Amino acid sequence: AQKVTQAQTEISVVEKEDVTLDCVYETRDTTYYLFWYKQPPSGELVFLIRRNSFDEQNEISGRYSWNFQKSTSSFNFTITASQVVDSAVYFCALKSGGGADGLTFGKGTHLIIQP
Amino acid sequence: KAGVTQTPRYLIKTRGQQVTLSCSPISGHRSVSWYQQTPGQGLQFLFEYFSETQRNKGNFPGRFSGRQFSNSRSEMNVSTLELGDSALYLCASSAGPAASYNEQFFGPGTRLTVL
């Protein structure tokens, strides 16, 4: 069985602060992929990043960065110098077991950036 | 490239009725997956279609069914609606089948309300 845990239900910070969203996953497979999606109030899930289990390099894309650590089964997401437009629900997701069962999502973290 | 489109965006039905939702994937994408999003259960995988064949199905009753046409457009049907079927139904499009681990691009969703 696979599982994704996002322990932070809601995070509220003031604009320009850095914020880290935690994601812990469980899977017995050695081949798997991890994803982050952003869901703004409009409802559409926006793809942010995909990372496979064989690539533990951290990734940076503008103000966004991701820290993948297999030793702790974590795939955390950091937003640097947050902006009001970053306010959304963020989902971490896992696909493993040959990918046949679709994405397994965490419950999501509601990020509120206050001006 | 146009994104994933879903119609209708909003739907209100009464218990016992049936409903059909439609999804048009990104041009060139042959895989369509459906997800149900509710406040209680979060995002859950319903099923995936690739080349007009259902490849995988999540843990949902037989009242939930779907199909895919030769142009990759997909429809999802829910029969004998129950109050608990009220949810945001999201469609995701991917270039390859689920087992290929390609990232999935989501549509805006159809919000179904069952009264």
Image: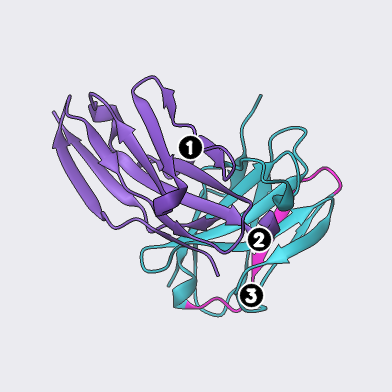
Chain colours: A purple, B cyan
- Left or right: B89 as drawn, with respect to B61: left
Q: Name the residue rendered at 23%, 36% in the picture.
A: A19
Identify the image quadrant of the N terminus of chain B: top right
The subunit carrying tag 3 is B
Residue at x 26% of width, y 54% of height: A8
Tell me whether marks 1 and 3 sit on the same chain: no
Inspect the image, locate mark 2, and give the three-letter code of the amino acid beneath it.
Gly
Q: Residues within 10 Å of mark 1 (few under 14, many from 20)?
A: some
Q: Residue at x 50, y 38 (%)?
A: A56
Mark nearer the N terminus (1 vs 2): 1
Q: B14 and A82: which one is in front? A: A82
- Left or right, B79 with respect to A24, comes to right
Q: Which amino acid is tagged 1?
A: Val
Residue tagged 3: B79
Q: Are marks 2 and 3 in contact (CB under 8 Å)?
A: no
Quarter of the C terminus of chain B within the rendering: bottom left
Between the residue at mark 1 and the residue at mark 3, the CA separation in whole angstroms equals 30 Å
Query: Of residues A4 and A53, which is closer to you in this image?
Result: A53
User: In the shown orientation, is residue A114 left or right of residue B38?
Assistant: left
State the image coordinates of residue B60 (x, y, percent, origin top left). 60, 74
Q: Which residue position holds label 2?
A: A97
User: Can residue B58 be seen by looking at this rendering?
Assistant: yes
Instruction: Return the residue nearer the eye: B113 or A18.
Output: A18
Q: Chain of mark 1?
A: A
Q: Residues within 10 Å of mark 2 (few under 14, many from 20)?
A: some
Disc 2 is attached to a residue of which chain? Answer: A
Residue A46's label in the rendered image is: 1
